[in-house]
Amino acid sequence: MKGSEKKKTGPWTVILCVSLAILLFMALLNSALEMGERLGKVHISLEIAFYVLIAIVVAGGIVYPIVGIFFAPIFSLEKLHRADGSARQKWCRRLVRNLTENCELTEEEEEQVRGYLRLENETDDALIEFFDRKIRPELDSEIYDAAKRVFIITAVSQNSVYDMLGMASANFSLIKRITEICGFRPSNAQVFRLYIRVLSMTLLAGNLEDINIEELLPSFAEGALGKMIGVVAASVTQGAVNALTTLRIASVTKNYLLNADVSKTRKEIRKESYKEALDMMKSLMKQVMNDKVRDPVMNLFGKKKEAMP
């Protein structure tokens, strides 16, 4: 098994990942220098502070998550079905430890999950069902919150530096967080594929700023009102595209780890992940519209009605 994983991580995959990383670095550097020069015209201290802030964000939000994930052991629930003997017992104990450390379990649930270790041949099935039922909601909550942050940051931001930093930091940190909650990570080949997706979509997020999206959308009104509607619609569109990307990457990562069906292919996993991401996106858009549009309007008109005699 290990040999096949190493074989899948071909040199072209690594070269592509490194090339995209270099392109992202150059794009960030170019955008940061342009922004820094503008701030430098106001005061040199603002330019220096901006560069320091960028360096901190890149180190803590991009470099650390990328490097940190490789310290986690490679595993997936699918492998547990393939393992036997001492290897299966080892990973069953690891799942029990992850559950007790990362989930809020009652005393009865802790006793129950430890009791699964005494089931011998049925241990893996019982643990996988319990692990999936307890861990999946934790992962979904993390993924949803991260996508919501990406949506708000990239919808509000009108600067490619902020968009690229926000996208890269959120996605790399989310992949690392998913592996921390599960207690293991995907194979090297799968990690590199995920990183390629993150890097390519981060570059796309930066380039979206150069596209006048509001001009591509149909105009519903003329003058200042029409322009404002176009800008808002373009910002929402950009935020939605980036949030959906985050949901897709995170869903693929999660399903790589939690998939226990040995008959499923990678293509089927990616297809399921895309459907899951779309469903979460609908829920996210509904909540954002309620929080940012419907509720404020209802509160505004509700107060006006209360003020009327």
Image (cartoon, grey):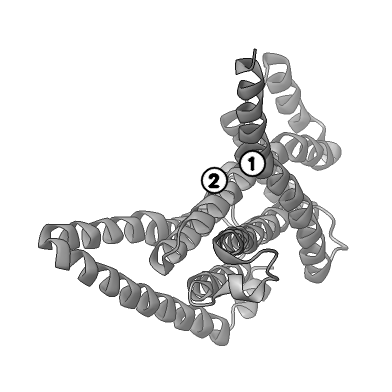
Residue 271 point in image, percent of width and height: 81, 65
Placement of the N terminus among the 4 image quadrants: bottom right
Q: Nearer the viewer, residue 272 or 27?
A: 27
Which amino acid, mark 1? Val
Assign a secondary structure to mark 2. helix
Whether residue 83 is visible = no
Which amino acid, mark 2? Glu
276 to the left or right of 297: right
Q: Furthest-top residue in view?
A: 309
Q: Residue at x 27, y 61 (%)?
A: 55
Q: Is residue 181 above or below residue 151?
A: above
Residue 107 point in image, percent of width and height: 67, 15
Q: Residue at x 63, y 37 (%)?
A: 291
Q: Earlier in the sequence, mark 2 or mark 1?
A: 2
**Residue linked to disc 1:** 293
Residue 101 tag number: none
Q: Residue at x 61, y 59 (%)?
A: 229
Residue 180 tag number: 2
267 to the left or right of 111: right
Disc 2 from disc 1: Cα separation = 35 Å
Q: Is residue 70 above or below residue 122?
A: below
Placement of the C terminus among the 4 image quadrants: top right
Sort mark 2 into few (<14), some (14-19) or many (20+) by Cα contacts within 10 Å. some
Whether residue 39 is visible = yes
Residue 218 point in image, percent of width and height: 70, 71
Q: Furthest-front residue in view?
A: 309
Sort mark 1 into few (<14), some (14-19) or many (20+) by Cα contacts within 10 Å. few
